Image (tube, rainbow, N blue to C red):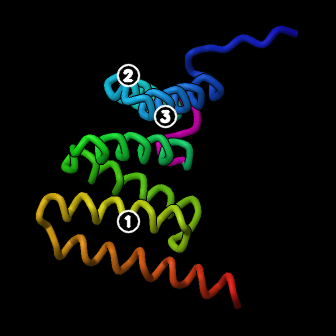
């Protein structure tokens, strides 16, 4: 039986995200941005807007903006993906601390030192808890 791939199928949506990540690593930022957005939209249609897969694509797009110095654009996407990942995996995950660190760096670059400090402390607390749990 031949398998066909439609635009709104999960395989295609995940491939869009993967290709966007490749373009990002190659410095093809506009292509990456376009594909991350397509992936987010397609995954949202297939799986629902509040899923881990959508959160990952949102985080990837936020990381692209972060890397480009578009901190004001990155922060809301990091926030959105953070909330979705926390809902899917819990609040004390390594992924959460990484997002918090990225958000803190954005706030630092924007001169919002107090907000950055809070996020840095939260990320540090998560890493410490994970380390303690690992050796307990």
Residue at numbered disc 2: 31
Q: Do tag 2 and tag 3 residues touch (Cβ < 8 Å)? A: no
Query: Does 44 sit left or right of 114 as displayed?
Result: right
Who comes first in sequence, dot 2 or dot 1?
Answer: 2
Disc on res. 100: 1
Return the disc, 3 or 1, that comes first in the chain's sequence.
3
Q: How many marks?
A: 3
Q: How crowded is the residue under tag 2: few (<14 C-alpha within 10 Å), some, or many (20+)? A: some
* Image location of residue 19, percent across then percent down: 52, 26
Q: CA distance from mark 2 to mark 3?
A: 10 Å
On screen, residue 52 versus residue 26, left or right, reads: right
Q: Secondary structure at mark 2?
A: helix
How many angstroms separate mark 2 from mark 1 (CA)?
26 Å
Q: Quadrant of residue 94?
A: bottom right
Q: Is residue 46 above or below residue 57?
A: above
The residue nearer to you, when weighing 4 against 25, is 25
* Residue reaching furthest to the bottom: 136
Q: Which mark is residue 21?
A: 3
Q: What residue is shown at x 56% (from left), y 27% (from top)?
A: 13
Q: Is residue 75 magenta?
A: no
Magenta part of the chain: 45-51
Q: Secondary structure at mark 3?
A: helix
């Amino acid at each position: 039986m031949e398998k066909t791939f439609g635009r709104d199928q999960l395989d295609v949506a995940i491939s869009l995200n993967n290709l966007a990540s490749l373009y990002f690593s190659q410095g093809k930022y506009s292509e990456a941005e376009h594909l991350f957005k397509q992936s987010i939209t397609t995954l949202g249609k297939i799986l629902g807007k509040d899923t881990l897969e959508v959160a990952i694509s949102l985080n990837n797009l936020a990381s692209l903006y972060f890397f480009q110095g578009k901190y004001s654009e990155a922060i809301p996407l990091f926030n959105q993906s953070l909330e979705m990942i926390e809902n899917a995996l819990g609040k004390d995950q390594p992924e959460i601390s990484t997002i918090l660190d990225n958000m803190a760096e954005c706030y630092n670059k924007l001169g919002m030192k107090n907000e950055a400090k809070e996020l840095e402390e939260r990320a540090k607390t998560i890493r410490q808890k994970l380390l303690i749990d690992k050796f307990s």
